[in-house]
Image (tube, coloured by chain):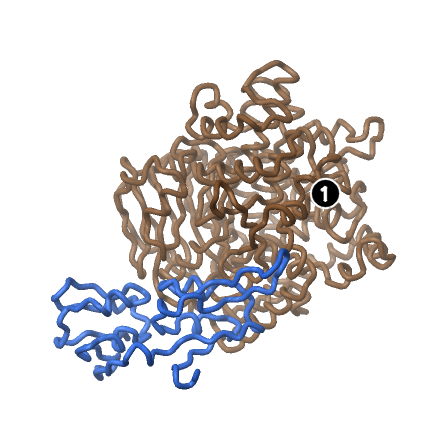
Amino acid sequence: MAYSITELCEGCTACARLCPVAAIAGTPKGMHTINPKRCVECGVCARACTKSAVADAAGNPLPRVPRKDWPKPAFAAENCSACGICVQACTAGALAISLPQFRGDLRVSAYLANEKKCVGCALCAQDCPMDAIRMQTPEVAA
Amino acid sequence: MYTPRYAKINLSTGEIAEHPISRTYYEKYLGGKTLAARLLLDLMPSGLDPLAPEAVVVVNTGPLNGTGAPCSSRFNLSFKNVLTGGVASSNCGGSFGVMLKKAGFDGLIITGAAEKPVRIEALDGELSIIDAADLWGLDCEETQEKLPKAYGKLVTGPAGENLVRYAGLASGERMAGRCGPGAVFGAKKLKCVTAYGTARPYVAQPEKYHKYVQEWVRFVKNHSMTGDALPHYGSAGLVSKANASHALPTLNFKYGHDDLADTVSGETLAETRLTRNSGCVSCPIRCERRVMLDGREVKGPEYETVGFFGPNIGAHDLDAICRLNYVCDILGLDTISAASTIAYAMELYEDKGVDFGVRFGDVSNLEEILRKTALREGIYDELANGSKWLSEKYGGEDYAIHAKGLEMASYEPRRSVGMGLGYATSNRGGCHLNGGYLALLESVGVLSVAPQKPRSKGELAVFMQNALEAVSAAGCCLFSAQTFVPDIFFKLGPHHWVTRLVGKIFTLAGPVLRLLMAAGPLLRLNTLYILPHAQALRLCTGLPVFTGAFLRVGERSYNLERLFSVREGVTQDSLPGRVTRTPQVPGDPSTVVPLEKMLPVYYKTRGWKDGVPTKRTLKKLGIES
């Protein structure tokens, strides 16, 4: 099952630009569609849609969420093995492995290097084999 | 019941079809190079030229790829060996294997040849053949930059396009270097395979598996080799160890020790050039070196590359080694075969005056020569055929350092005779990893199992070969097998009496190993400390893969690959005269590889007659030839 886009879509392209798995196709001002084979139901498109034109797998329309309220990954460095699975999963390019602090420093770990790029898809947290990533909404973090 | 998904692509006709894998095949061969060897035997007509259009190449993954298990990003290519004419398997890290699985495929079987350059794209469970005229002629780096960043990529470079016999394939900055897969792609006019998708690889018991993976990652991180030595110094850290035990090939394997080796060691690299370490996706070891070259960060050299572009050609310029490593990578050349062929050419000049413009100690023109070799320009057309071909034309077979046609790796077998046996018997040719990597137990590891004595080496080689084959079939990196040597020995150090005693005991291990291997699937004891991959495979596949069954998978692999080579007429398990006849220390006969003493024991342990698996052995393993 996958998310879908309803006729309310006005073709603003916001969802297609943010989709972390490039599952959304469409032309500007034209109706967009979601490739069901690729959709991972992360909900990023729904949160970004000003027209609430995205419906979940059951067909329920989903509300827009202001960007400041999107969830962000929080890292438990002590659990991280720096295996890079999250960095690869993050197509937005928001994550990186930290640099060594001195020559021979092996205590490096994944971190949110570019918060602005993060779309809150949670693919990093889902893929992390070490459970080192938790998604947090901003109020929880605060 | 789950079975892996394979598809067959015929580039001549453009036909794409599913290739069903039976449950029996899955249970017996799992995946990776074991299943690929079976498919090669089934699907490839015998007697074909490795570069013929009908030649089959299997690109596949193992069950653990993409599941989060440590070091589980390795994928495999199996095909007919361009250098030896026997079987070939080439293994590579990077993200391609993981992405192929996420794209919904466990393996691709490619046959036929396109008329114009093409690429194969695996997207969300669908395959397509796309024109790639715009990519043909570009180097590995440029090609990958032109493709979408998120895709897993497997590309051939100029060397492959020009059918250099030791051309490799690049995936990111990792290389499937050995045996000439780049040339096979080039002959098929296949520039690259790309993959992308979001499917989740199959795991039979997700919760238990997830928990086990976490334990396994912690175990790997806490082991002295995988958690400390390899992350600090990479594989290049072995230079000083090999040099200390006189097992570092020097001046085309004339000697095993170089007084200046420290100037190019992994320690020196870490202290003077390393910017950080990195790794393949899902690997907690992170052995990859990152170094600066012309103002930007690139992949640093591995042990083999350091050894072969360093002491083995009489050079000690670490900057040049980093540069030549990078040049080989973007051209799509196997650094081992390329550098070893150059070392042979250097000696050929000294011995017979045949001049390819290369001299011991001089690295100044090697970048240019590598580029000319990749393009097969002028006299370098001949250098592109490898050292076996050259020695057949110009002579000097004794110092053409290859086995079956594939250049040997950077471990001097005269101070690591088990490794010598491995080189000789390795199905794909002179390969340390396919050969069982006994150097780890003889010359570069913490244990020292009588490096110059043949006793028990036959059994040890069989045991290690089977274990490493099974690790590859699982989809894991062989560095994850470094934890097979218990951490306690690293803590005690190589000179502690306990470590030395255990090394001595291992020289008597032959009968015990034979017994263990005969027990086969009855061996069920399995923990993190004893073949951790087996338990991961159990939880991932749902199959009863315990220690014995796991080793059997490796044994099937070795026998299947041997069957393929025998069918193609490649059976001779031999080594060059330099290592079997000329003592490394003049006048000391213990410094040669006593191959004739080890081979009979090896064959007996394997259940082979004159290098050929017997019907009884195949029946025991359930292999139908």
Identify the residue under disc 1. Answer: B242
Provide the letter of the chain coloured brown: B
Would you say residue B493 is visible in this rendering?
yes
Where residue B590 appears, x then y in whole percent?
82, 35
* Left or right position of B451 against B206: right
State which quadrant residue B7 falls in.
Answer: bottom left
Helix, strand or loop at mark 1 = helix
**Residue visible at 47% across and 27% down in the picture:** B373
Where residue B536 appears, x then y in whole percent?
56, 68
* Residue located farthest toward the right when viewing the structure as drawn: B497
Where residue A104 appears, x then y in whole percent?
64, 57
User: Does residue B383 lie above or below A2 as drawn?
Assistant: above
Callout 1 amino acid: Ala
Where residue B327 appears, x then y in whole percent?
48, 37
User: Does residue B495 lie above or below A49 as drawn?
Assistant: above
Where, quadrant-wise, is the C terminus of chain A in this rendering?
A: bottom left
User: Does residue A2 lie above or below B410 as drawn?
Assistant: below
User: Does residue A57 lie above or below B488 as drawn?
Assistant: below
